[in-house]
Amino acid sequence: MQNIALVTGITGQDGSYLAEFLLSKNYAVHGIIRRHSTPCTERIEHLIGAENFFLHYGDLTDSSNLANLVRKIQPTEVYNLAAQSHVGISFEVPEYTAEVTGVGTLKLLEAIRQNKPDAKFYQASTSELFGGLPETAPQSELTPFYPKSPYGAAKLYAYWITKNYRESYNLFAANGILFNHESPRRGEDFVTRKITKAVAKIFSGKQEKLSLGNLNAKRDWGFAGDYVEGMWKILQQDKADDFVLATGETHTVREFVEVAFAEVGIKISWRGVGVEEKGYNAETGKLLVDVNEKFFRPAEVDLLLGNPAKAEKILGWQRKTNFRDLVKMMIESDLRSEKNS
Ligand code: NAP
Ligand code: GDD
């Protein structure tokens, strides 16, 4: 019997890597896409038309659509990756974020409970759940939650409703609590991609400088391609459970900037503090990085550092790509795009 996966958020960074991974394992992959006035399928363009790859219009806010799709597709595994996933923007659209990222998860769980209760369900939970308790790092499955944004609060609801459906209705419903994972396909308004794209443009002479927000924030950054394998492993267990996927390393945004510029042979020298901090080309003295308050958030998550010991032990999962290789991969890809543009 062929495995059938239903993936929400298939047009996103993770959705595209997960679709490739599942197709390589001979799954039939069904993805839900939203209608856009301009195309949104750039990350999965190469999969469209492939055998075993199917797209359906839908939306996490539309429960009848979700029920119809689950009834029609009869998935063996459902991966819920769809979300308004930008933490900073969730402060601008808090209600919408709650509807999609929080209640949308409930709608999908209900669709499964009523139409395919033996399907295995993966919820894209997040290290943003740990948010405001930096003293608890490294954070594991046992660390208390303290979300610091409308996004984090919506994901908290999604985490608990997933656990609740597991305990109340005996669904195979599992949370992957994933720390930040990046790639050349990362959205351009997340800090890593914003940096690598800007470095490539500055190096190509098409941009003067890069403006950022909080340079002191620390994140546990891994490669998205490694993490989608972890998602799949979470659903291959006999019993549903919750797992942290992380690298166990943390770096500041400032360090990410330094390593990214170093990839094109530029050393950054920093001067000033807070909003006055600036990064200069150490050789030429040219201003390359500054801080703009407009990128600060009303509340910040200062430190994320994951402890992936449980996933390593039970799933046999480990990140393969280290921090420097991740930055290098992203810079090389953005340099290629600049060259071809
Ligand atoms: P992403 O690139 O922002 O992709 C989000 C996806 O959700 C897109 O396909 C988007 O579709 C879809 N979506 C948004 N609103 C929707 C709605 N109302 N109905 C249906 N689909 C909708 O996010 P990602 O980085 O791949 O992350 C995947 C999931 O993991 C998200 O739930 C995110 O919150 C979570 N997560 C990510 C990380 C990370 O570091 N990347 C870490 C922990 C957890 P459109 O293309 O139509 O906008
Ligand atoms: N986006 C952005 N843009 N972030 C900036 C900037 C900037 O110009 N300057 C500094 N930062 C800081 C943010 O304040 C934050 O502390 C850190 O860089 C990372 O920001 P993002 O890349 O936007 O990611 P995130 O950590 O807020 O959220 C991502 O990871 C979560 C898992 O921890 C998203 O992928 C979430 O969906 C995911 O749940």
Image (cartoon, grey):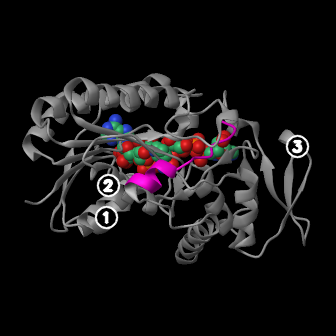
**What kind of element bears circle 1?**
helix
Question: Tag 3's secondary structure?
Answer: helix
Looking at marks 3 and 1 on the same chain, the residue that comes earlier in the sequence is marked by: 1
The magenta-colored residue range is 301-314
Determine crowd level at label 1: few under 14, some 14-19, many 20+ residues with C-alpha closer than 10 A.
some
Residue 136 percent across, percent down from the top left: 65, 35
Of 321 and 287, nearer the camera is 321
Q: Residue 21: which disc?
A: 1
Q: What residue is shown with label 3?
A: 276
- Inspect the image, locate mark 1, and give the three-letter code of the amino acid beneath it: Phe
Q: Per the image, is 306 magenta?
A: yes
Residues under labels 3 and 1: Cα distance?
A: 45 Å
Position above or below: 68 against 102: below
Q: Amino acid at mark 2?
A: Trp
Left or right: residue 203 compared with residue 48:
right
**Image vertical order of residue 52 relative to residue 141, above or below:** below
Specify the label residue 232 is tagged with.
Answer: 2
Frontmost residue, 281 versus 168: 168
